Amino acid sequence: MASTSSASLTFATTSLRSSVRSTTPFHCASHRSGSSIGFNRLGFRGVRFHCLKTTTSYSMAATAEKKKRVEVFDTEEDLASSLAKYTADLSDKFGKERGSFTVVLSGGSLIKSLRKLVEPPYIDSIEWGKWHVFWVDERVVPKDHVDSNYKLAYDGFLSKVPILPGHVYAINDALSAEGAAEDYETCLKHLVKSNILVTSSATGFPKFDLMLLGMGPDGHVASLFPGHPLCKENEKWVTFIKDSPKPPPERITFTFPVINSAAYNALVICGTGKAGPVQAALGNSQNSDVLPVQMVSAEGEFTWFLDKEAASKL
Ligand SMILES: O=C(O)[C@H](O)[C@@H](O)[C@H](O)[C@H](O)COP(=O)(O)O
């Protein structure tokens, strides 16, 4: 996807040498039963780069991985502008190609970084009716709980755009963590049958159009934490954790095969506190432990949106 900035200049890469409206959610359980619940590392070889006014873009040369880009922004504000355009462009592409756009959200600071989607021009230009919204992970708490990723997204984003209530796939918060994970996976399977979701011909796992991921300071993504056995899950689509090191402890999460089957994956990372794992994934780190963030890929295109603090160790 093209960068938004126009002024370009050469960038010295010595530090990068290393490697380079009523949005009530559709309740998954009610979907099946019909009952209405009412809620309703790159081994960079041959890195190509250019520095734009506010963005530094690195396009990876062809490797085993498909298209990977790393974009570094001077400010989070610039990042948010570019992320909005990126998302709107993909919404347009998939809306035209398939008549729908399946988007997966994370919790955390990502939602704030999506704020420009609810402003002109995107608020008016995006075909919100074609959006289907999912969560890559969710805390097993009531939907109105302060820790709920649904509530975070609803308050900061979904309540401000005309996404159809039936197209917002929240977890069933009446279930246990295990039950909610099973229920969410069943919901996804129904959506595959009804052709709203497609599956990857390469992996057989669901292939979401766009997955918007955050990353924790320990290098976790979704609710897949460093050293946790769930990182190796390769059969389930959705699983659960009861001992999350980041509170709250009980969560459900997409597994890596699902995350990595997405057509487009975007990792949105800001702040100095995250520079270490970013360096481990993109830079010249000696650490041999593989962090979850290093396990992310995409079937189509994988873009890193970094502010300059997050990229400060590259
Ligand atoms: O529910 C969650 O906890 C998230 O989905 C989690 O994976 C989050 O995206 C990262 O921890 C980054 O969060 P921050 O951007 O707030 O650091």
Image: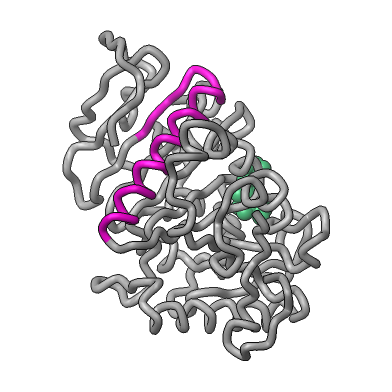
Judged from this view, the residue extending furthest toward the bottom is 33
Place residue 309 in its image quadrant.
top right
Note whether 191 is above or below 129 in the view shown.
below
Q: Position of residue 80 (x, y in %)?
A: 52, 31
Identify which residue is drawn at 32% across, 27% down: 3
Q: Position of residue 183 (x, y in %)?
A: 61, 82
Question: Quick one: quadrant of the N terminus?
Answer: top left
Q: Position of residue 217 (x, y in %)?
A: 63, 41
Magenta residues, as a range? 70-97
Identify which residue is drawn at 54% across, 66% down: 167
Identify which residue is drawn at 42% across, 16% down: 54
Q: Is residue 76 magenta?
A: yes
Identify which residue is drawn at 68% across, 83% down: 179
Q: Is residue 33 magenta?
A: no
Place residue 234 in its image quadrant.
bottom left
226 or 49: nearer the viewer: 49
Residue 253 shows in the view: yes
257 or 200: nearer the viewer: 200
Note whether 123 is above or below 144 in the view shown.
above
Note whether 27 is above or below 109 in the view shown.
below
| In-image side of 274 versus 299 (left or right) | right
Place residue 239 in its image quadrant.
bottom right
| In-image side of 200 versus 30 (left or right) | left
179 or 27: nearer the viewer: 27
Q: Main secondary structure of the magenta part?
A: helix
Residue 312 shows in the view: no
